[in-house]
């Protein structure tokens, strides 16, 4: 298992302090995904549940975790969470490339990001899409996929 750098451990402790509602430096299991994403990782909700040991929905809402209990979970997420490849992203974009010319409509991508699966807010989508569309609202799929893979995850 990879050692977590001290600076990241400090960020994790700060996140726990901010999200601890009772001042006990514990957070509910349902908040773990938010913490992981704030720390720059992008696992799915399904991955989060798996890395937490598959707790029930009731446990996700009621059980809490300390920062010390979270550290090995975070290390495991960093090491084992599935990361999308350029080819994975391009395959997903092809679904929206109706003309087969390597471009998609930005409005369509915005709609998908705000309405399907793990929905993003309009503000998050606007941040992601900033500078990605041309004046006609068209996105070059390959350029967009490269941007998504290269952009710092915490930016989203």
Image: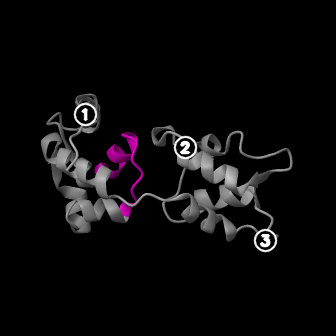
- Give the image location of residue 2, x and y in percent: 23, 46
Instruction: Quickly name the residue at label 1.
Output: 5
| Above or below, 58 relative to 19 | below
- Give the image location of residue 131, x and y in percent: 72, 39
Magenta region, residue range: 31-45
SS at circle 2: helix
Residue 150's disc is 2
Cα gap from disc 3 to disc 1, whole angstroms: 45 Å
Cα gap from disc 3 to disc 2, whole angstroms: 26 Å
SS at circle 3: loop
- Give the image location of residue 14, x and y in percent: 26, 30
Instruction: Quickly name the residue at label 3.
Output: 98
Residue at the image position 17 percent from the left and 40 percent from the top: 67
The one of 146 and 18 positioned closer to us in this rendering: 146
Q: Residues within 10 Å of mark 1 (few under 14, many from 20)?
A: few
The one of 74 and 49 positioned closer to us in this rendering: 74
Question: Quarter of the image holding residue 89?
Answer: bottom right
Q: Please report whichever mark, 3 or 1, sits nearer to the chain's N-terminal start.
A: 1
Left or right: where does residue 43 sit relative to residue 60?
Answer: right
Foreground label between 3 and 2: 2
């Amino acid at each position: 298992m990879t050692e977590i750098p001290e600076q990241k451990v400090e960020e994790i402790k700060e996140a726990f302090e901010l999200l601890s509602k009772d001042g006990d430096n514990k957070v509910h299991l349902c908040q773990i995904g938010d913490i992981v994403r704030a720390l720059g990782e992008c696992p799915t909700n399904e991955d989060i549940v798996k890395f937490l040991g598959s707790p029930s929905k009731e446990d996700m809402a009621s059980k809490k975790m300390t920062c010390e209990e979270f550290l090995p979970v975070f290390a495991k997420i960093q090491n084992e969470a599935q990361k999308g490849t350029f080819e994975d992203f391009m395959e997903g974009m092809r679904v929206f490339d109706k003309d087969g010319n390597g471009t998609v409509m930005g409005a369509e991508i915005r709609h998908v990001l705000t309405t399907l699966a793990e929905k993003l807010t309009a503000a998050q989508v606007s941040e992601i899409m900033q500078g990605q569309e041309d004046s006609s609202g068209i996105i070059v799929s390959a350029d967009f996929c490269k941007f998504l893979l290269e952009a710092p995850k915490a930016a989203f």
